Image (cartoon, grey):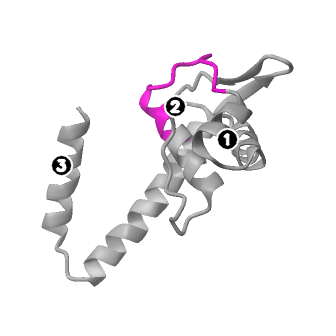
Amino acid sequence: MFSINIQGGKPIYEQLYTRISELILSGSMAPDEKLPPIREVAKDMGINPNTVQKTYQLLEQNGLIYSVPAKGSYVCKLTEESDALASLRKKSITQFKESAINAINHGVSAKTLHEEIDSIKEKQQ
């Protein structure tokens, strides 16, 4: 289902949010696909249902999923103009910049960074 690192330093709800966001943006979860029920996710992952609820609420607030009362939560259809997609891309760019600055400060050349980006891009295609 979803994988997270419970011993990691990052809060569980953030890890779960990131993982579900990745699945939605990559197309692994299709528009209008139903997400697993909160209790099922909590039980399968051995975490508190409130943590899953918090994640689902955050996904909904950011326009990645929508909820239907008494039916469950579903993946939103994202368009190139959607605020959710723009927000996630902006966050990704910010994280990339921080990582690139860190790498450069540790002596990694721009050429090496470009090669890594090209390598990642090839693997994604």
Q: Is residue 96 left or right of residue 41?
A: left
Answer whether labels 3 and 2 touch (C-beta < 8 Å): no
Picture residue at 52% right of the left edge, 31% below the top: 24
Q: Is there CB contact under 8 Å for labels 1 and 2?
A: no
Label 3: few (<14), some (14–19) or many (≥20) C-alpha neighbours in 10 Å: few
Depth order, front residue of 36/67: 36
Please tell me the numbered disc located at residue 118. 3
Return the residue at label 1.
42
Any magenta on residue 59?
no
Sequence order check, earlier mark of 3 and 1: 1
Residue 109 occupies quadrant: bottom left
Residue 116: horizontal and vertical position, in percent?
19, 56
Q: CA distance from mark 3 to mark 2?
A: 23 Å
Q: What is the number of the mark on residue 24? A: 2
Q: Amino acid at mark 2?
A: Ile
What amino acid is labelled 1 in the image?
A: Ala
Give the magenta part as a residue range. 21-36
In the image, 91: left or right of 102?
A: right
Magenta: predominant secondary structure element?
A: loop
Q: Position of residue 46 (x, y in %)?
A: 62, 47
Q: For the residues carrying marks 1 and 2, which lies nearer the camera in this image?
A: 1
Label 3 secondary element: helix
Give the answer, above or below, for where 68 lies relative to 125.
above
Q: Residue 104's spot in the image, x, y percent?
A: 26, 77
Q: Residue furthest right?
A: 69
- Residue 58 versus residue 70 in the image, above or below: below
- Callout 1: SS: helix
Q: At 48% across and 61% down in the image, what residue appears?
A: 94
- Residue at 72%, 45% in the rendered image: 58
